Amino acid sequence: MKYIIMLYGSQREYDALTGKADDAWTAEEVAALHRFMGDWNNELVESGEFVEARGLSAPVHARRIEFRNGAPVVTDGPYPETEEVLAGYTVVECESFDRATEIAMRVTRAPAPAHAPVEDWFVDVRPLDEEPPRP
């Protein structure tokens, strides 16, 4: 079964990672995070559970299209009503939902500076439907 592990972040966190905020990460801190994520993906490749992974651009580069009053309405990001947005995802193929959860839990060990504790970070895990739902 395939599962998607969705990682979330905010525009503020993107700004901190790219040095555009008062609480900016150092180059070494960003490199450590990238190493950690690369190692995490490589472990999944080695175990045969990796399917695909992507990081997404900052929310400031997003557009939301909503249907309101009979017409589509386009809003440029970031969205003031939403703090966290999808920052990236990893698709794994593994034996069970519990195994996918175990894999996702490893992200909680990601390195972060003291001013950006990882307890503010979260991920969601969901099974991917490979067929349309049946009635």
Image: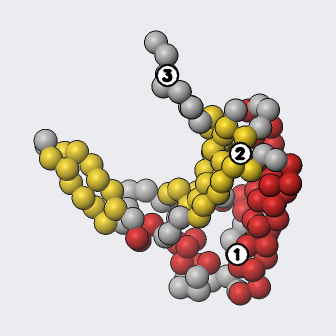
Foreground mark, 2 or 1? 2
Q: How many labels does the image show?
A: 3
Does 124 sit above or below residue 107? above
Does 129 sit above or below residue 81? above
Tell me the CA gap for discs 3 and 1.
44 Å
Q: Which residue is drawn at 53% across and 56% down?
A: 86
Asked if marks 3 and 1 touch (Cβ < 8 Å), the reply is no
Quadrant the N terminus occupies: top right
The disc, 2 or 3, on the residue closer to the chain's N-terminal end is 2
Q: What residue type is labelled 1?
A: His
Q: Which of 35 and 25 is in front in this view?
A: 35
From the image, tell me which residue sits under label 2: 92
Asked if marks 2 and 3 touch (Cβ < 8 Å), the reply is no
The x, y position of residue 50, in whole percent, is 74, 50
Mark carried by residue 133: 3
Does 1 sit above or below residue 9? above
